[in-house]
Image (cartoon, rainbow, N blue to C red):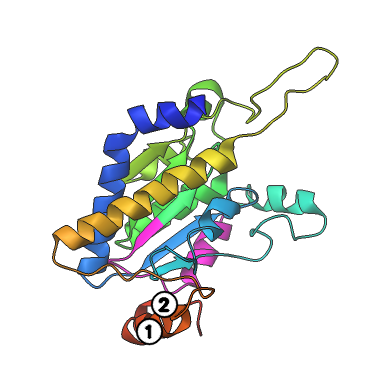
Amino acid sequence: MALLARVREEEAGSIAAAGALLADTVASGGRLFAFGAGHSSLPAQDLVYRAGGLALMNLLAGPGLVGVDVRPATLGSALERVEGYATAVLENSPLRAGDALVIISLSGRNALPVELAQAARARGVRVIGVTSVAYAEGTTARNPSGTFLKDHCDVVLDNKIAVGDAELSVEGIGAPFAPASTVVTSAVLQAVMASAAGALLERGVEPPMLRSGNVDGGHAWNAEVFATYRDRIFYQH
């Protein structure tokens, strides 16, 4: 709760800026994508094809990067450090100039998020990074550029998570526990989506929101949105 309150207080401007960036992208005909590897993929997935969310948010993924479904799970961590993998993911995606990409990486130090942000911006894609700035201040970069995700973004959202992503320590338990990054990052990104919806309305554009399929009329509403924005929604086909 303290972390959420701190983020609300300190990141309000960045949340509004990220929402405006997404609104500008939608209003100008661009597409929206979200990416995260390992547990950072969970907040990204939370943005895609969900009730109350922007219909245009698509998941950018690669083999072994989404969640902990890869076996062994440690392979996913290793893939984040492989140089060139991010470029391969991007080159085999529909991303193009004028689109926007949300990249989520708690540490922001590995090759994958850094190279992805660099390569995306070189292609004319605007990048929103969600990360912990504390890692850039308290760890060393683990990629050839020596930089962090935060150094390659149009907008940076700092989730304020401490190095190690564990909020509690108790005598008798050797390692700190209770990670908070997923909860805080998801809250931040849903605030960004809400800000984007408001910013679109201010631009005279009705935000393409999805309704729950479990309420009367929800499927019909979504079908109309899908039909209208078919060329910008990739999780349908």
Comparing 204 with 15, the one in front is: 204
Could you tell whether 196 is left or right of 176 in the image? left
Residue in the picture at 54% in, 73% down: 214
Residue at the (36%, 68%) spot, across then down: 209
Determine whether the residue tagged by mark 1 lies in a helix, strand or loop: helix
Q: Nearer the viewer, residue 38 or 13?
A: 13
Are the residues tagged 2 and 1 within 8 Å (C-beta)? yes
Foreground of the two, 169 or 24 = 169
Q: Give the labeled residue for mark 2.
A: 233
**Residue where numbered disc 1 is placed:** 230
Q: Is residue 68 left or right of residue 211?
A: right
Q: The residue tagged with tag 2: helix, strand or loop?
A: loop
User: In the figure, 139 relative to 155: above or below?
Assistant: above
Q: How many numbered tags mark residues here?
A: 2
Part of the protein shown in magenta: 84-101
Q: Check disc 1 and give the amino acid type.
A: Arg
For the view shown, which residue lies furthest in the right direction?
172
Q: Amino acid at mark 2?
A: Ile
Residue 139 lies, in percent from the top left, at 56, 25
User: In the image as oriented, which residue stretches furthest toward the front?
Assistant: 216
Q: Which residue is more in the foreground, 95 or 55?
A: 55
Q: Residue at 29% across / 67% down in the picture?
A: 97
* Place of residue 50 in the rendered image (x, y in percent of width and height, measured from the top left): 49, 66
Q: Residues within 10 Å of mark 1 (few under 14, many from 20)?
A: some
Residue 192 falls within the magenta-colored stretch: no
Q: Position of residue 83 (x, y in %)?
A: 58, 52
Left or right: 54 as drawn, with respect to 141: left
- Examine the rendering and report whether any part of residue 144 can be seen: no
